[in-house]
Amino acid sequence: MDLSIVIPIYNEETNLPALYARVAQMLDAQPSWQAEVILVNDGSRDRSLELIRELAARDPRIHYITFSRNFGHQIAITAGLDLSSGAAVVVMDGDLQDPPELIPALYAKLQEGYEVVYAKRRTRQGESAIKLFTAKMFYRLLASITSVNIPLDTGDFRIVSRKVVKALKQMPEQNKFIRGQIAWIGYRQTFLEFDRSERASGEPGYTYSKLIRLALDGITSFSDLPLRIATIGGFTVSGVAFLVMLYAVYARFFLHNYGVGWPSIMVSVLFLGGVQLMAVGVIGEYVARLGANARQRPLYIIEDTDLAPEPAPEARYSK
């Protein structure tokens, strides 16, 4: 198999016909390719699964994986990578914001000797100014606090070699951040720029709460800076409290200041309590992720698929 195309699907009933038409047209224009398209149904609540099965019955290049419930976008990508068989694998979204027509250019660039070619967004259409600003800040914050060179302004739209897929299978952590893991793996990587279109139709699967969760997964997976900030903050507040204590003793015995000082006491207590709660929360995020990995539950459970799962030493999936 020359190429596998992995596409997570979550409530994409309205986009699936156009998605299939564009992907099929692109593949028809490459008759020398032996390709497969893996649609991963991530617990959709609409008719996505029914349409996917119809496409698979009509076109032998189309295959499907359906989960027992919604496990999340990054886990759906992982499942598609696990069951893919192509020498190269493309990961793209199913909302047509990632153009299938760019795949031949990505594939050609990969053949130049690269292991990863990611699609870098030149422009992003149809997104609010708030989302554009927060995304820009997140990518730059992540780049500044991690030792891993995670490309700026990129999503999961990319093509990787089989060598990279095998390396990803050795990373069984529960809180996936695929683009960060691929950057961590290394090898020769490059990019192609493209203009990202707005979503064809329907509601985006990534709500702000899911985006915040993804950002936390990215930060906690590749940086321990929040823990260092909590530690430094604790020492700083303790130092300030010690200086305030010295001043209180000096004021009492040398300045004869007998003021009650309730406002300063309350401010100090609230400030110290806030810092402590913040530090505990940061530590809790890391501990929660350690606990999720320690339980060693399957990353996902497959309800049905027309692909044969490969045996793996890790508890990655169950059927």
Image (cartoon, helix red, strand yellow):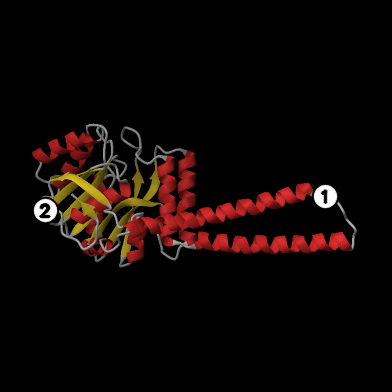
Q: Determine the residue positioned at 61% across, 51% down.
A: 274
Q: Residues within 10 Å of mark 2 (few under 14, many from 20)?
A: few
- Name the mark on residue 260: 1
| Circle 2: element type | loop
Q: Determine the residue positioned at 14% across, 51% down.
A: 35
Q: Quadrant of the N terminus?
A: bottom left
The answer to which of 243 and 176 lies nearer the viewer is 243
Q: Position of residue 31 (x, y in %)?
A: 10, 50
Q: Is residue 241 visible?
A: yes
Q: Determine the residue positioned at 21% across, 50% down.
A: 5
- Name the mark on residue 181: none
Describe residue 10's horizontal placement relative to residue 122 as left or right.
left
Q: Position of residue 89 (x, y in %)?
A: 22, 55
Q: Earlier in the sequence, mark 1 or mark 2?
A: 2
Q: Position of residue 180 (x, y in %)?
A: 37, 58
Name which residue type carries label 2. Answer: Gln
> Toward which corner of the image does residue 294 lie, by quadrant?
bottom left
Q: Is residue 91 visible?
A: no
| Circle 1: element type | loop
User: Alpha carbon of mark 1 to alpha carbon of mark 2: how far?
Assistant: 82 Å
Identify residue for label 2. Answer: 34
Describe residue 66's horizontal placement relative to residue 253 as left or right.
left
Which numbered disc, 1 or 2, marks the residue closer to the eye? 1
The answer to which of 260 and 312 lies nearer the viewer is 260
Image height of 42 relative to 185, above or below: above
Name which residue type carries label 1. Answer: Val
Q: Position of residue 231 (x, y in %)?
A: 57, 63
The answer to which of 213 and 51 lies nearer the viewer is 213
